[in-house]
Amino acid sequence: MRRREFIAGIASAAPWPLTARAQQPTMPVIGYLSNASANLDPQVLTAFRGGLNSLGFVEGRRVAVIYRWAEGQNERLPGLASDLVRRQVAIIAAVGTQSVHAAKAATTSIPIVFLVGGDPVEGGIAPSLNRPAGNVTGATLFDVEVTPKLVEFMHELVPGAARLAFLTNPTNCGKI
């Protein structure tokens, strides 16, 4: 037997340490922070998961999500936000103004994407809508820029109208 064949045979039979094998890439982790609870906000949670799926981030396969719910107890939010920072999540999805403030207080380096029901500038989340600044960006359900245009459009349609009325779903107001 030749020396090279002998060495190759020994090398192929030897058990290799686990560190020598190819390492699996780590799965990104998203932190989800909400002042509500999972059963009180199923529509937002469904939309969040649907958005991830549409981008190819299937929970448990291509991305992991750590959920933190304050269950309506806003005083718990700073601790929950700090926990997500300690776990070194890649991004924090913050739902609700109080959740965003807790996340902002906990980190200046982890990106924070928010969904709030009010004006983020008025709520102290962002200095302006065009440039949210820092590590914070997001969306609001309160359409600050479009509502005045809607009133203007309605006034053009009915210039003599002294009153305008808007229909809304009161069960959907103020949830976020």
Image (cartoon, rainbow, N blue to C red):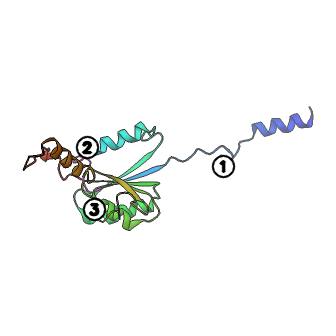
Question: Is-magenta flag for residue 106?
Answer: no
Question: Is-magenta flag for residue 36?
Answer: yes
Q: Is residue 171 left or right of residue 68?
A: left
Indicate the quadrant where residue 167 lies: top left
Indicate the quadrant where residue 107 lies: bottom left
> What residue is rendered at 44% in x and 65% in y?
108
Residue 161: x and y in percent read: 8, 46
Q: Secondary structure at mark 1?
A: helix
Q: Look at mark 1 in the image and give the residue it sits on.
A: 19
Q: Which residues are magenta?
A: 34-43
Q: Look at mark 3 in the image and give the residue it sits on.
A: 98
Q: Look at mark 2 in the image and give the residue it sits on.
A: 42
Of residues 70 and 165, the one nearer the viewer is 165
Residue 42: x and y in percent read: 25, 43
User: The disc labelled 2 sits on which kind of residue?
Assistant: Pro
For marks 2 and 1, the one nearer the N-term is: 1
Label 2 vs label 3, nearer the camera: 3
Q: Residue at the bottom extreme?
A: 105
> What residue is rendered at 46% in x and 37% in y?
56
Residue 92: x and y in percent read: 40, 55
Q: Secondary structure at mark 3?
A: helix
For marks 3 and 1, the one nearer the N-term is: 1
Quadrant containing the N terminus is top right
Report the Cα–Cα distance between label 2 and label 1: 42 Å
Q: Is residue 165 left or right of residue 143?
A: left
